[in-house]
Image: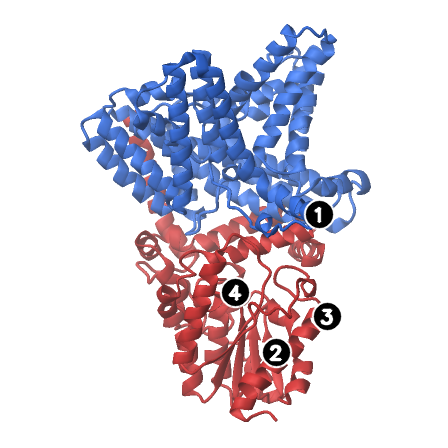
Amino acid sequence: MLRSFLRYLLLFSILLAATWQSIAREYQLEFPRAPGPRFDNRVRRLYINRLAEEQPEMVMLGDSTLLDGVDPEKLSALTGMEISSFDVPGSASAYWYLVLKNNIVESEHRPKYVMILFRDTILTAPGYRVHGSYFVQLDEFARRNEPVLLERAYMGLMNPLERFLERYLPLYAARVQIRRDADALIRYSLTAWLGCDRACNDKSMYEIFTSANLEPGQLQNAIAAAEGYLYTRRQLDFDRQIDRSFLPEMIRLAQENDTELVLVRLKTLITGEQDARAVERYIGDLSDYLAGENVQFLDFGQDPRLMASYYKDSLHLTQEGEARFTEILAEGLKDEIVLDKGAGK
Amino acid sequence: MSFTGLTFWVFLALVLAAYWMLPERQWKNILLLGASYVFYGWVSAWLACLLGLSTLADYFLAQGMRVSPSRTRLLLIVSILLNVGVLAFFKYYNFFGPDLARLLDAFGIGNDFLLVRILFPLGLSFYTLKKLSYTIDVARGTLQPTHSVVDFALYVSFFPQLIAGPIDRPQKLLPQIEAQQSWKAEFFYNAWPLILMGLFKKVVIADSIKVMVDQVFSLDSMSLFLFSMGALAFTLQILADFSGYTDIARGVALLFGFQTSENFNRPYLSLTPTDFWNRWHITLSTWLRDYIFFPIRRALLRSRVRLPGWLLLSIPPIVTMFGSGLWHGAGWTFVVWGLYYGVLISLYQLLGIRGEWRPKSPAVWGLAWLTMFFLIVFGWGIFRAPSLAWLGNILFNMPFIAAQNEFIVGLITLSMAIVYSAPLLIKFVLDRLSTDSWLHSAYYAVASVLIVVFISSSSPDFIYFQF
C-alpha cells in the first residue's frame, strides 16, 4: 500500500514538473509571478465618448436593475437635468469603480453628479461579479496596472494557499484559461463535426439561453443563488468590508475631481434566507458612513410606493414599475439632492 | 463547511492531529463530538442546538425503553413522532406555508408568521434516519442502548457523514465508537484514494456537467431531445456528485479509524428497478427496506383481510418508494419520482423479474440494461424537473426536435456529459483489470492534476445536501 502511494506521488510529481514547463510556455506566464489576473493595457473610451457627445449634468451608473428601473429621458424631463445612463447588465462595484476612474474622471466633460444605483451590500462586495465573463467586462476598462482592483477584487479574497499556488504553480495560475480551453474543445468539437462551426454553436447557445426563455421560477432561483453572495455574514459586516471595498476610492475620486457622488439604494423583492435585521443594520452603518463623508444617499430599499406588482422578478421592474420609480426617484432628487444643491432647475 | 473548501481541510488536519495524540478512547470521542458540532454549527449555531436537543431526546427515550420495557411502545411512538415531526416541519413548512396562509386568510385569521421562510437544517434528513434506526432497534430488542451519551451523540453527529450520509446503522458504527482506536498506516493508505476520487468526481466531473444541466433545466420549455440530453447529463452529474461526497466522507472517516458503509455499487449497470435500488444510495435503500418495506409486507401478510396477490406484491414497494420521494424533498416532482419507482418495482415483480435476475443471453442482458438505463434517466428527468406542470408540458406538448438551435444545444450538453464523465468509465475498466497497478497510480496522478485545474476558491454545495 505504501508502494502504490509512493508510485502515485512519483507520477504526480512528474506530471507537475511537465506542466510547469508546458503551461508556462503555452500561456506565456513567468514564475514566480504576482498572484491575481492580468489585465491588458487597452481601455475602452466608450463613456468618455458618450460624455463628450451627450454633455450630461448627471450620470447614472448601475446594472440591469438600472436599465429596467429608470427611464433616463423621463428622469431628465422631470428633474430638468441632462442625465445619461451608463447601465451595464452584470456590472457591480468593481466595474463602476473602473468606469469612474478610467472614463468619467478622465473625460474632458465631467458631470456634476455621478449617481450609482445599487442594492443592499453590493457597494462593499468587491469580489462580486469579477470572475469568468465578468472579468472580460472589467478588462475592457482596466489598465495593466490596477493595484486597487487587484488587491480588493482578487488578492484580498484569496487565502494564503491560493496566493502561494497562484505565485508558484502554473497549473493553478492558468486554471481559468485551461478550463476555458478544455470546455471550448468539448463544446465545439462534436457540433463542428456535424457542420456547425463556432459561430453557429455560440449563436445556438445565445438564442436558447436568453432570459426570455427561462422558466420564471428557475430565473428567481438563479437570481437568489447569485445574489446570495451579497447576504453572507461577511458581506453584511459593514465595518469589516468598507476598507476592503471600492467605495472609499470612488468617494475620493469623485471629491478630488469636483464630481458629487449620489448613492441610491434600490428596492428588491429577494425573499431568500438573508437576515432582514442584518441588512437594516448594514444600511444604517452605510448611511452613517456616507453622512460622515458628505455623500448624498437616497434609500428606496423599503419604499412602500414600490409595490410587488411593479416587479417582473425579484430585482427588475416592469415598464409600469420603471415609470413609477422614475417619478419617485425624480421626487427624491428634487427634494433631497438637487434642490439642496441648487442645480438642475 | 464544505468538503471542497480549504477551511474544512485545515479543520480536519487539526482535529486529526489532536485525535491521534489523545490516548484515551473517551477523550478521543469527546474531541470528535466537539469537532462534529463545530463542523455542523459553522454556519449557524442554532443548527447545532437543534441537533443536540433532538439527540438528547432520543438518548433518554432509548434509556427509558431499557429502564421500563413495558413503556417501550409508547416511548417508540414518541421518538417516531418527534423525529418525523421535526423532519416534516422543516421539510414542508416552506412548501405548505404560503398555501396555509392563503387558507387562513380566507377565514380572516392572521397568518404573517406562516410566510416567514425557514432555513432547512442541512443533514436533518440523514441524522433523523440514524436516530430512528437506533430507537426502533432498541424497541425491537435487536440493539442494547448505549449508556454513554457521548457515544450516542457521536454516532448521530459523526461529522464525515453528518451532512449527507452514509446512513450507517448503530450496529455498525457504535461498536467502533465504543472500541479503543489506535493509529494504523493502512487507515491512510485506504483513505487517500477515496478522498482523491471523491474530490475528482465532485470538482472535475459533477461541477463541470452541472453548468449545462442547470442551464437546460432553467428553460421554460424545450424539445424532448433537449430534455433527454439534460436528463442524461443530470444522471451522470448526480452519480458523480453524490458518490464523490460519499467517497470523501468514507475516506475522512477512515482517517479516524472508522469503517463506514458503501453507498454505491455501479448503479447504472442495474437490470431491474430493485437491482438499481440495491446499488444506489444503498444505506438509504436498506433503511427503507428494513423499517418501511418489511414491516408493511409483514403487516399485509398477517392481515385478516385477504388481498389479491398482485396487491400484496405492489403495496409495499409503492408505499416505500412514496416515502423515499417524500424524504427526498418537498415537491410533487419528488413524490412522483418516488411513486414512479414504486410502480416500476411492482411491475417488474409482477412480471416475475426480481432484483437478482440475470439473463444468460447477452442480447437479453443488453436489452434489459438499455431499458433500465432509459428508465433511470427518465426518473432523474422527473427528479430534476422544476415542477410537474413543466414536465407535463414537455412530455405532452413539445415535439422531439423543435429547432436546429435546440438540437445543437442538445449535442453540446451530450458532449459535455460524455467527455466529463468518461473518467468514471475509465476507472470502472481499470478496477475490472486489477485492484492496484501503475495504471491506477497514473489515473490518480492525472486526476490530481485535473483537480488543481478545476478547483476554484468557491465551494459549490453537493446536491444531496438539500435532502
Query: What's the distance in space between the residues labelled 4 and 1, CA to CA?
Result: 55 Å
User: Element at badge 4?
Assistant: helix
Image mark for residue B107: 1
Question: Residue at the location (35% across, 47% down)?
Answer: B6
Host chain of mark 1: B
Is residue A311 visible from the viewing direction of this image?
Answer: yes
Relative height, residue B277 to residue A198 (above, below) = above
Label 2 crowd (10 A; few <14 / some 14-19 / many >=20): many
* Residue at figure coordinates x 51%, y 86% from the top left: A107
Q: Where residue A160 appears, x then y in whole percent?
A: 30, 54
Q: CA distance from mark 3 to mark 4?
A: 33 Å
Q: Do discs 2 and 1 share a chain?
A: no
The chain whose colour is blue is B
**Residue for badge 2:** A329
**Secondary structure state at the residue bearing disc 3:** helix
Tag 1 secondary structure: loop
Taking the spot 64% from the left edge, 54% from the top edge, the residue there is A219
Is disc 2 placed on a helix, strand or loop? Answer: helix
Q: Residue furthest front?
A: B108
User: Which of the pair B94/B454 is nearer the observer?
Assistant: B94
Which residue is label 3 attached to?
A320
Q: CA distance from mark 3 to mark 1?
A: 33 Å
Q: Disc 3 to disc 2, how far (Cα)?
A: 14 Å
Q: Which residue is mark 4?
A: A136
Q: Chain of mark 3?
A: A
Is there CB contact under 8 Å for labels 4 and 2? no
Chain A: drawing colour: red
